[in-house]
Image: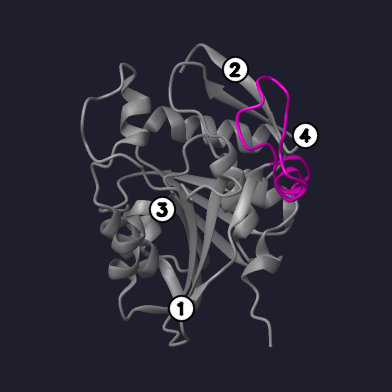
Amino acid sequence: MSDLSCDGFLNGRLRVAQPRRGFRSGADAVMLAAACPTVAGQAVLELGCGAGVASLCLGWRVPGLRLAGLEWQADYADLARRNAAANGIAMEVLTGDVARPPAELRAQVFDHVIANPPYFLGGTAAPDGGRAMARREDTPLAAWIDAGLRRLRPGGVVTLIQRADRLDVILAALGARAGSVAILPVAGRAGRDAGRVIVQATKGARGPLRLLATFVMHREPAHAGDREDLTEAAAAVLRNGSPLVPLFAKVS
């Protein structure tokens, strides 16, 4: 893969190579990593890891993890391996299909699975093939969730970020296999509908669903041009690597 940019994440704490014209990870990957409630010594699998941004943000925040990624596109998988090495974070990256994972991955179980599945349902492909594959749903969202649950140990946690209008599909796919579901709506600005949801569920749990308070990304009511207007909470996550985990914790 040629024509790469070197992008800073977490205020430059991570330097990640990404294609200039292909799919490029951004805030969603950082938010996904921030929501994963893992601790040192646990094993975490990212489905569709792309260039590795979410896993590397997680590995930076929680040293001592066993990180693994599955990526369909071989050039992105290779890029994820290179990015992990460049940032000094150990990560095993396998190439394969989420719906038909390689035997090497099927032999493993994990404490956590994270994923940022494609957002768009078919339609016109982007001019860049890699971007189109990363953003267009060729493997159904339910298959991503099934694959994640299969790789989790009992009591393991799956964390997804997805468009808010796909929440019904996510909940149906989780079904009776995972419970204690917590949903964090993410809105671009106060007073606007949530465009994203971060959904977290525990395999085999039976606890009730919880709808959390909306997380707002920007302070201003409208786009502020080139001036950054992240809320204090969003800046803490995107710039300083602060976790979203406390938002998912149950209040007794």
- SS under mark 2: strand
Q: In the shown orientation, is residue 4 left or right of residue 135?
A: right
Q: Earlier in the sequence, mark 2 or mark 3?
A: 2
Residue type highlighted by circle 4: Asn
The x and y percentages for residue 95 are 38, 41
Q: Earlier in the sequence, mark 3 or mark 4?
A: 4
For image coordinates 47% across by 43% down, the residue present is 49
- Contact between marks 2 and 1 (CB within 8 A): the answer is no
Q: Nearer the viewer, mark 4 or mark 2?
A: 4
Spatial CA span between label 3 and label 4? 28 Å
Residue type highlighted by circle 3: Ala
Residue type highlighted by circle 1: Leu
Location of mark 3 (residue): 164
Location of mark 1 (residue): 209
- Contact between marks 2 and 3 (CB within 8 A): the answer is no
**Pointer 4 local density, CA inside 10 Å: few below 14, some 14–19, many at least 20:** few
Q: In the shown orientation, is residue 74 left or right of residue 29?
A: left
